[in-house]
Each structure stands twice: as structure tokens, then as C-alpha cells.
Image (spheres, rainbow, N blue to C red):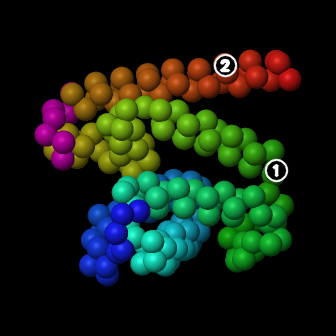
Amino acid sequence: MARSATEDDIRRVYRDTIDDLYRFVSRRCDGDRALAEDVTQETWLRAVRVWYQDGLPDRPLAWLTTVAARLLSNHFRRPAEQRLDDAAHEPLAEDRDAAVDRTNKRSLVERALARLPLSQTRLLEAFHFDRTAVGQIAASSGLSERAVEGRLRRARQKLRQQIEADLAADKEGDDHD
């Protein structure tokens, strides 16, 4: 953290990062929009408090996504009876095995995405998570639709390879336990 943050600095960072932060959080909330909004808001409250005191980080979005990931981790780790407002959002008897399986799959995909080149990660996120049409991606990136489709295919192949490597490593680790 280099210098103390001014209100203008924080507003600029907010404008530059809010969409990416909300997208990051909402993908990890299984469609729970209220939770995504709460976590995004809490992340920004913490950022303002810390940044006024300690200054802006070198990579604000990385700082924000780290805080948001920890808030989500804490939320999902907390027993259901301690979560606020959960009664209004979740059925009382969720199948634990299904929830664990969903969390494991999400973690596997997130780890694999994190190791892909940023351009491939953003392309996959835009198409699969944000549901952006190939034509829109092509127009915004200055590529032809055919080029976008080719890049999507290669990114999916790379993602599949990463996931398969992780599954093999996890299985190997289980065999040694």
C-alpha cells in the first residue's frame, strides 16, 4: 500500500472494479443475489475503512477479490443456524452431500480457471457465466465470430486439461493417505 487514499481515488477504483467484483462474487453464490450483494457491499465497506487508513493497494481488484473470497468462505463455513437471513433464502433440509459435491466442483473449476491465461479466463467467464453471445464478444474484442469460437474451443480444452490434471493429483493424494 503506497499512499493514503482520497475520496476521489476510492470512487475511481470503485467505478473501475465494481462490475468485476460483483461478477466474481455472484458466480460463487449459486444464484443467491442477496448474498452476492451483501458480500460485495461488505467488501467495499472494509476496503474504504482500510484504504483511508493504510492507502490504496497496488492491485485494488486483487485485494477486493481476496477479501470477498474470505467473506464467502466464512459465510459457507458457518453453521446454517448461525447465518443471518438464511431461513428466508434456503430450504430447511438441504441435502448435505449435494451441497458438498457442488462446492467441490465449483472449487475444481475455479482452481483450473485461475491457472489459465487471463484472456482465456475472461472469455470463458463472459460466454458461460455472463451469458454473453459470441457475436457480442466478437464485436467488443474486434475479432470475428469464428475467431471467438476458436478461442472458446481452445480455452475449453485447456480448462478440461487443467481439471483432469487436478483430479489426477487429488486421486494420487488420496491414494497416498
Label 1: which secondary element: helix
Left-right relation of 87 to 11: right
The stretch drawn in magenta includes residue 85:
no
Which of the two discs, 2 and 1, labels the residue nearer the N terminus?
1
**Label 2, label 1: how far apart the Cα atoms are:** 25 Å
Amino acid type of the residue tagged 2 in the rendering: Ala
Identity of the residue drawn at 51% across and 20% down: 161
Q: Mark 2 points at which residue?
A: 168
The quadrant where residue 128 appears: top left
Label 2: which secondary element: helix
Residue 58 is marked as none
Quadrant containing the N terminus is bottom left
Tag 2–tag 1 contact (CB < 8 Å)? no
- Looking at this view, is 75 or 81 the one in front? 75
Magenta-colored span: 140-146
Please say if 165 is above or below 128: above
Q: Name the residue under label 1.
A: 96
Please say if 38 is above or below 163: below
Percent x, y for residue 124? 39, 38
On the question of residue 41 being in view, the answer is no
Amino acid type of the residue tagged 1 in the rendering: Arg
